[in-house]
Amino acid sequence: MFFQQITLAYRRKTGVLRRRWEVDVNPLDSAETAADLLQSLFGLEGKVVVVTGGGTGLGRETARLFAGAGATVIVADLDVSKARHVADEASVAALFEIVRDELGGATIFVNNARIYPIKPLLEISAEDWSRVLDNNLKEAFLCTRAAVIQMQAGGRGGRIVNISSIASVHPALKG
């Protein structure tokens, strides 16, 4: 358990008066779920979150946590059966137009979509590699740029979360 220290300081004619209270408040003690903890720490009601790569895995769980904490979540993914496709400029523009027009604009953007062919290096074609670069670099750039433009236009700022993989320094496949 920890103590949240609240310090109030204000000036009087004679100087600075400081008051300090120690309050027995621990969000971990009162939260029953991870979503409860996120809500108590970050107050996600009214936030609009766009999660790329949110159709499966870590992206899906990230989207679920944000939604469970009160945010409105838009999932974008390469697999159109699971979510909205974001690999090209027109798709990115359409995605963020919908977010702006229907929800007032993104306040949080989670850049999670990443791919890599599950095969040895010598079996990866130039087409496979182009797809990796388009998804992992171009899509990340296009979506981040669109999110920043929307956050600035909304006048309230926002947050961008970039998720990467340990595979960049510790590849699983040899060959």
Image (spheres, rainbow, N blue to C red):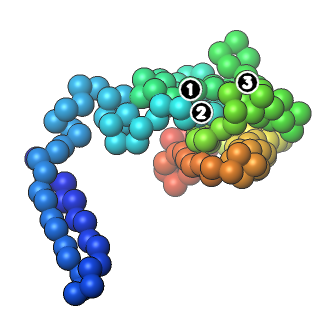
**Label placed on residue 86:** none
For numbered disc 2, what is the local secondary structure? strand
The quadrant in which residue 50 appears is: top right
Disc 3: which residue = 102
Badge 1: residue crowd in 10 Å (few <14, some 14–19, many ≥20): some
CA gap, disc 2 to disc 1? 5 Å
Q: Residue at 68% across / 51% down in the picture?
A: 155
Q: Nearer the viewer, residue 127 or 164?
A: 164
**Dot 2 and dot 1 residues touching (CB under 8 Å):** yes
Q: Are marks 3 and 1 in contact (CB under 8 Å)?
A: no
Most distant residue in the top direction: 81
Q: Amino acid at mark 2?
A: Val
Residue type marked 1: Thr
In the image as oriented, which residue stretches furthest toward the right?
90
Instruction: Please indicate whether residue 42 sits to the left or right of residue 77 in the image.
Output: left
Is residue 30 at all visible to an observer of this figure?
Answer: yes
**What is the secondary structure assignment of the residue under circle 1?**
strand
Can see residue 171? no
Q: Position of residue 159 (x, y in %)?
A: 57, 49
Q: Which residue is mark 1?
A: 72
Q: Nearer the viewer, residue 111 or 36?
A: 36
* Labelled pair 2, 3 in contact (Cβ < 8 Å): no
Secondary structure found at label 3? helix
Q: Residues within 10 Å of mark 2 (few under 14, many from 20)?
A: many
Residue drawn at x 75%, y 33% as measured from the top left? 100
Measure the C-alpha gap from mark 2 to mark 3.
11 Å
Q: Which residue is tagged 2?
A: 48
Whole-percent x, y for residue 91 in the image: 83, 30
Figure quadrant of residue 9: bottom left
Position of 10 relative to 127 (above/below): below
Q: Is residue 52 above or below residue 55?
A: below
Q: Earlier in the sequence, mark 2 or mark 3?
A: 2
